[in-house]
Amino acid sequence: MTREQYEQRKRRLEEQLRAGIQLLESAHQAQVRALDLVWMLQAEELAAGLVGETAAFVSPEPTSPPAPAKQEPLPAPSPPRRRGPGDLAEDVRAALSRLPHRFTRGDMCAALGYEPDRGSLYRILQDLALKGTLHIESVGFGRRPTIYSNPGAPDRPADG
Protein backbone atom coordinates (compact mmCIF):
# COMPACT_ATOMS: atom_id res chain seq x y z
CA MET A 1 0.00 0.00 0.00
CA THR A 2 1.36 3.38 -0.94
CA ARG A 3 1.25 6.48 1.24
CA GLU A 4 -1.39 7.95 -1.08
CA GLN A 5 -3.62 4.86 -0.76
CA TYR A 6 -3.18 4.95 2.99
CA GLU A 7 -4.21 8.60 3.18
CA GLN A 8 -7.16 8.02 0.84
CA ARG A 9 -8.46 5.10 2.95
CA LYS A 10 -7.95 7.09 6.13
CA ARG A 11 -9.98 10.02 4.69
CA ARG A 12 -12.72 7.60 3.64
CA LEU A 13 -12.85 6.15 7.16
CA GLU A 14 -13.10 9.67 8.63
CA GLU A 15 -15.94 10.49 6.22
CA GLN A 16 -17.74 7.28 7.15
CA LEU A 17 -17.31 8.14 10.84
CA ARG A 18 -18.80 11.62 10.34
CA ALA A 19 -21.69 10.20 8.29
CA GLY A 20 -22.36 7.56 10.96
CA ILE A 21 -22.34 10.17 13.71
CA GLN A 22 -24.77 12.34 11.73
CA LEU A 23 -27.11 9.36 11.23
CA LEU A 24 -26.94 8.53 14.90
CA GLU A 25 -27.65 12.13 15.90
CA SER A 26 -30.60 12.28 13.48
CA ALA A 27 -32.02 9.08 14.90
CA HIS A 28 -31.59 10.41 18.43
CA GLN A 29 -33.36 13.66 17.53
CA ALA A 30 -36.25 11.71 16.00
CA GLN A 31 -36.57 9.61 19.16
CA VAL A 32 -36.56 12.74 21.35
CA ARG A 33 -39.25 14.35 19.15
CA ALA A 34 -41.38 11.19 19.41
CA LEU A 35 -40.93 11.13 23.19
CA ASP A 36 -41.88 14.83 23.40
CA LEU A 37 -45.00 14.15 21.34
CA VAL A 38 -46.07 11.29 23.62
CA TRP A 39 -45.39 13.47 26.68
CA MET A 40 -47.49 16.33 25.31
CA LEU A 41 -50.37 14.01 24.38
CA GLN A 42 -50.38 12.44 27.83
CA ALA A 43 -50.28 15.86 29.48
CA GLU A 44 -53.26 16.99 27.36
CA GLU A 45 -55.22 13.83 28.25
CA LEU A 46 -54.39 14.25 31.93
CA ALA A 47 -55.41 17.93 31.89
CA ALA A 48 -58.67 17.09 30.12
CA GLY A 49 -59.39 14.36 32.66
CA LEU A 50 -58.64 16.63 35.63
CA VAL A 51 -60.89 19.40 34.29
CA GLY A 52 -63.79 16.93 34.02
CA GLU A 53 -63.17 15.56 37.51
CA THR A 54 -62.79 19.00 39.06
CA ALA A 55 -66.13 20.13 37.66
CA ALA A 56 -67.85 17.08 39.15
CA PHE A 57 -66.34 17.45 42.64
CA VAL A 58 -65.19 20.66 44.25
CA SER A 59 -63.67 20.45 47.70
CA PRO A 60 -64.73 23.26 50.05
CA GLU A 61 -61.30 23.52 51.63
CA PRO A 62 -57.92 22.44 50.36
CA THR A 63 -56.66 19.19 51.77
CA SER A 64 -53.09 18.59 52.68
CA PRO A 65 -51.41 15.64 51.06
CA PRO A 66 -51.25 12.56 53.26
CA ALA A 67 -48.03 11.94 55.10
CA PRO A 68 -45.91 9.48 53.15
CA ALA A 69 -46.06 6.01 54.61
CA LYS A 70 -42.82 4.81 56.06
CA GLN A 71 -41.62 2.02 53.83
CA GLU A 72 -39.14 -0.58 54.86
CA PRO A 73 -36.54 -1.22 52.19
CA LEU A 74 -37.05 -4.55 50.50
CA PRO A 75 -34.35 -7.09 51.21
CA ALA A 76 -32.04 -7.70 48.30
CA PRO A 77 -32.89 -10.92 46.47
CA SER A 78 -30.43 -13.65 47.17
CA PRO A 79 -28.30 -14.48 44.15
CA PRO A 80 -29.05 -17.85 42.57
CA ARG A 81 -26.84 -20.68 43.72
CA ARG A 82 -23.80 -20.89 41.48
CA ARG A 83 -23.65 -24.29 39.87
CA GLY A 84 -20.45 -26.10 39.04
CA PRO A 85 -19.68 -27.44 35.56
CA GLY A 86 -21.05 -30.92 36.25
CA ASP A 87 -24.06 -29.88 38.35
CA LEU A 88 -26.38 -29.28 35.39
CA ALA A 89 -25.50 -32.65 33.84
CA GLU A 90 -26.25 -34.36 37.17
CA ASP A 91 -29.53 -32.43 37.51
CA VAL A 92 -30.55 -33.42 33.96
CA ARG A 93 -29.82 -37.09 34.58
CA ALA A 94 -31.82 -36.96 37.81
CA ALA A 95 -34.73 -35.17 36.08
CA LEU A 96 -34.97 -37.83 33.36
CA SER A 97 -36.83 -40.12 35.76
CA ARG A 98 -39.50 -37.43 36.30
CA LEU A 99 -40.11 -36.87 32.58
CA PRO A 100 -42.55 -38.61 30.25
CA HIS A 101 -41.32 -40.87 27.47
CA ARG A 102 -41.50 -37.94 24.98
CA PHE A 103 -40.43 -34.50 26.20
CA THR A 104 -39.15 -31.11 25.10
CA ARG A 105 -36.66 -28.64 26.53
CA GLY A 106 -39.55 -26.89 28.31
CA ASP A 107 -40.54 -30.14 30.00
CA MET A 108 -36.94 -30.60 31.10
CA CYS A 109 -36.79 -27.08 32.58
CA ALA A 110 -40.03 -27.76 34.47
CA ALA A 111 -38.58 -31.01 35.83
CA LEU A 112 -35.37 -29.24 36.82
CA GLY A 113 -37.25 -26.46 38.58
CA TYR A 114 -35.06 -23.74 37.08
CA GLU A 115 -34.12 -22.34 33.68
CA PRO A 116 -30.54 -23.38 32.85
CA ASP A 117 -28.38 -21.81 30.17
CA ARG A 118 -29.85 -22.84 26.81
CA GLY A 119 -26.52 -23.75 25.28
CA SER A 120 -25.41 -25.85 28.23
CA LEU A 121 -28.69 -27.74 28.34
CA TYR A 122 -28.57 -28.29 24.57
CA ARG A 123 -25.03 -29.71 24.77
CA ILE A 124 -25.97 -32.07 27.60
CA LEU A 125 -29.07 -33.33 25.76
CA GLN A 126 -27.06 -33.81 22.56
CA ASP A 127 -24.40 -35.70 24.50
CA LEU A 128 -27.05 -37.97 26.03
CA ALA A 129 -28.48 -38.57 22.56
CA LEU A 130 -25.04 -39.48 21.22
CA LYS A 131 -24.54 -41.93 24.09
CA GLY A 132 -27.92 -43.52 23.36
CA THR A 133 -29.49 -42.48 26.67
CA LEU A 134 -31.99 -40.32 24.74
CA HIS A 135 -33.30 -40.31 21.21
CA ILE A 136 -34.14 -37.25 19.14
CA GLU A 137 -37.56 -37.92 17.62
CA SER A 138 -37.83 -34.65 15.73
CA VAL A 139 -35.42 -31.74 15.42
CA GLY A 140 -36.90 -28.37 16.33
CA PHE A 141 -36.98 -25.41 14.00
CA GLY A 142 -38.12 -21.87 14.73
CA ARG A 143 -40.85 -22.08 17.35
CA ARG A 144 -41.22 -25.83 17.01
CA PRO A 145 -39.25 -27.52 19.81
CA THR A 146 -37.02 -30.53 19.48
CA ILE A 147 -38.79 -33.61 20.78
CA TYR A 148 -36.67 -36.07 22.72
CA SER A 149 -37.65 -39.56 23.79
CA ASN A 150 -36.40 -41.30 26.88
CA PRO A 151 -36.34 -45.05 26.22
CA GLY A 152 -35.96 -45.77 29.94
CA ALA A 153 -39.03 -43.77 30.99
CA PRO A 154 -42.53 -45.21 31.22
CA ASP A 155 -44.87 -44.03 28.47
CA ARG A 156 -46.80 -41.39 30.45
CA PRO A 157 -48.28 -38.14 29.16
CA ALA A 158 -46.48 -34.82 29.62
CA ASP A 159 -47.94 -32.34 32.12
CA GLY A 160 -49.60 -29.30 30.58
Image (cartoon, rainbow, N blue to C red):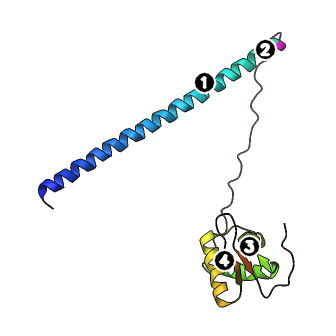
Of the residues shown, which amino acid type is indicated by label 3? Thr
Look at the image and say whether residue 65 sits in the magenta stretch.
Answer: yes
Q: Residue at x 80, y 82 (%)?
A: 97
**Viewport quadrant of the N terminus:** bottom left
Per the rendering, the mark at residue 40 is 1
Asked if residue 57 shows in the view, the reply is no
Pointer 3 or 4: first along the chain: 4
Q: Earlier in the sequence, mark 1 or mark 4?
A: 1
Q: Is residue 94 magenta?
A: no
- Kindly identify which residue carries mark 4: 88
User: Callout 1: helix, strand or loop?
Assistant: helix
Q: Are marks 2 and 3 in contact (CB under 8 Å)?
A: no
Label 1 amino acid? Answer: Met
- Name the image quarter holding residue 2: bottom left
Q: Nearer the viewer, residue 74 or 39?
A: 39
Name the side, left or right, on which 101 lies relative to 92: right
Q: For the residues labelled 2 and 1, say whether their Cβ atoms are less than 8 Å apart.
A: no
In this view, 111 is above or below 30: below
- In percent of the image, x 73 and y 68: which residue is there? 106
For marks 2 and 3, give the one nearer the viewer.
3
The mark nearer the N terminus, 2 or 3, is 2
Give the residue displayed 69% in from the left and 73% down from the top. Answer: 146
Q: Quadrant of the C terminus?
A: bottom right
Mark earlier in primary sequence (4, 2): 2
**x and y percentages locating residue 46 in the rendered image:** 70, 23
Task: Residue 126: give x, y in percent of width and height.
Answer: 63, 81
Q: Which residue is mark 3?
A: 104
Dominant SS in magenta? loop
Residue 149 position in % (x across, y down): 75, 81
The residues colored magenta run 56-78
Label 2 neighbourhood size at 10 Å, few (<14), some (14-19), many (20+)? few
Query: What is the C-alpha distance between the residues marked 1 and 4?
Result: 51 Å
